[in-house]
Amino acid sequence: MASVRITLPDNSIKSFDQSPTILQVAESIGPGLAKNCVGGCINGSKDIIDLRTPLSDGDRLEIVTSNSEKGREVLRHSAAHIMAHAVQELFKNVKVTIGPVVDDGFYYDFDPETQLTLNDLQKIEDRMYEIIQRNLPLMKEVWPSDKAIKVFAEMGESYKAEIISDLKTSEVSIYKQGTWFDLCRGPHVQSTGQVKAVKVMSIAGAYWRGDQKNKQLQRVYATAFYDKKELKEHLGNLEEAKKRDHRKIGKEQGLFMFHDWAPGMPFFTAKGTVIYNELANYIRELYRKYDYKEVITPQLYDSNLFITSGHYGHYKDNMYFSEVGENKTEVGVKPMNCPGHCLLFDSEKHSYRDLPYRMADFGRLHRYEASGALAGLTRVRSMSQDDAHIFCTDEQLQSEMEGFMTFLKEVYSALGMYEYKVFIATRPASRMGSDDLWDRAEGALTGAMDKLGVPYQINPGDGAFYGPKIEVHFVDAMKRTWQLGTIQVDYNLPKNFNLSYTGDDNTEHTPVVLHRAILGTLERFIGIYIEQCAGKFPLWLSPTQAVIMNVTDRQTEYCLELKKKLIAQGLRVEYDNRNEKLGYKIREAQLQQMPYMLIIGDKEMEQGCVSVRLRSGEMINFIPTDEFINKVVGEFKTRQLTSVFENANSTKEISH
RNA sequence: GCCGAUGUGGCUCAGGGGUAGAGCACGCCCUUGGUAAGGGCGAGAUCGUGAGUUCGAUUCUCACCAUCGGCACCA
């Protein structure tokens, strides 16, 4: 008698008379496992398959439970069905579309006859819990596509019918819970009762199939967890994340602001400007090391420049224009530095010996971004980048990519920013240049990353029409991803400007232009960085590095002397001599995340020293002033990420 | 740009058809106090802008502007 043997992760083997489903295997192991089972992975695959799937002899099975990372996906996918079910029970004439799992939750797009409102969110959630209570088993059925299209069309579910006909498969799977059913690939939980904790989060507009030309649907965001405790934890994390929102910290620390009369254009305060300039100067310092030459170029140009560059054709809607003079000459505000750099490059005759020519520019750029796109410092209309354009030969592509990435890694490591993802965007459908050219360019990009051992993902078809690019992405506090560093190959611009260099064969050649930025847009970088460090800037970036606090006004003179000394060493220091108690001054400095609080009382004055409080709460009392200065200046000048006093012996108690 | 929400002293927020209220911040006074808020007094707002309804609008309606959450965009 043939038996079906299934291998489990611990290499034990279970035998069955007939092909068991994943759930049946779970049941054979134990009731607890069966209860939590939401699917399985077979033969080392990472894809979860439905627990109703029959297995074959020799399969290796890993059972996925609802309290696991993978299981959560199944849970949420089923929760999306529960949500659609709830919405359709609650409201008449709501068409369903799709409801995928996303980071931290899921959403479902609806096309309701009357708009859902915020008040409906709680109703939806309540009804979801009701459906969960009903503990409806989820049944999988396979229908011929024609039948499915017919059934959904008759129900008025035009979106579903459209999806199925676009699938172009002969049959589709349907999941039923009670009388409600949905087209779905699965996998799904056993019954609605397996979903224990849900939360309907928000509502938003979203275009059908992500296309602006289509109807705008209503997207309801929600999340689901294994239990209420996990859900509570998640909601707590969201609250915590909001606290590090750069817009909030920027306001609290007085770093930047916005005004209605210049939407999307940040004003950096004196404090914020310190951060801005420290970052730019750090990059400037590295420009010497990496052989870049910084230039300054105009802000406004005759429109002819942008006609030549091609921006007038492709980017006009995102540009600011004006007319000047009696002749009403049209001028454009530069949205990018590259056209200006081309003029500069072209102003001299170049030899191949000059290449690669790396031209850097912190020039201010203005882009008329869509109003709905603006977001704090992360998406602005007025910005400056640590921008540079590298004019090089085709052969130099890969080594320039390597140089760029090495530069980038140095900067991000120095800033303690390791949580980034590297993407290589390859040729889009509509593009310029031969396949041969693209092969070489993409090869240079992947080759460089491989050589440096940088992990990356390919974004097929995501490149610009003029060349492929590397993008470095970071995530903000609210888990939105933003591009910071980038390097893009451009074969188009040098042609438009008719750029050339003389090769070793004494003929003229067209250089390649690489657009690149390490920090990317400084505004955006600062926004992301504020969130990464939660407002606790390393000393070298801190607008104010130390606050001197006197205990009584007997120390005033000593404090003023100390302030002078510190300033002479290039430190940014304030003296809080207000008529307030020490605890009050400390609280305030602490809320500002002040790196060093220097407490001066009679003791310190007598001994010629300072008592230091770190923002961590650590205290190092009675350090000779010179010792403190030496250490702190070192920390500042070498751009340390953490305090030189952190975890230092802070044993001494205050003696009265 | 699209869908939705929001817009009240510098900040965080309450209120509501009869021209506004709290806490913090700010100013003055008392307090000289040793590691996250000492006490008292005071000043500060035509309630985003414009129009409409009304005897009367900050409150209701509409339009616009800005911000927030998404979507689209991000050559």
Image (spheres, rainbow, N blue to C red):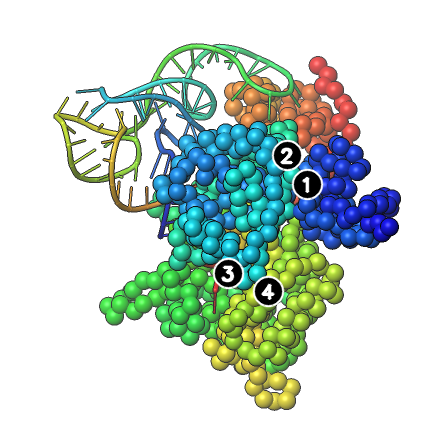
Image mark 4: chain: A
Image mark 3: chain: A
Helix, strand, or loop for circle 2?
Answer: helix
Tags 1 and 2 on a common chain: yes
On the image, the x and y values in percent for residue A628 come to: 70, 35
Circles 1 and 2, Cβ within 8 Å, touching? The answer is yes
Image mark 2: chain: A
Tags 2 and 3 on a common chain: yes
CA gap, disc 1 and disc 4: 33 Å
Of tags 2 and 4, the one toward the viewer is 2
Which comes before the other along the chain, label 1 or label 2?
Answer: 1
Give the left or right position of residue A499, taking residue B60 as reference.
right
Say which residue label 1 marks: A38
CA gap, disc 2 and disc 4: 38 Å
Q: Which residue is drawn at 39% across and 48% down?
A: A263
**Looking at the image, residue A210 lies above or below residue A647:** below
Circles 2 and 3, Cβ within 8 Å, touching? The answer is no
Q: Residue A460 carries which label?
A: 4
Tags 1 and 4 on a common chain: yes
Q: Which amino acid does label 4 sit on?
A: Pro
Q: Which residue is drawn at 55% across and 37% down?
A: A178
Question: Residue A63 is drawn in which quadrant?
Answer: top right
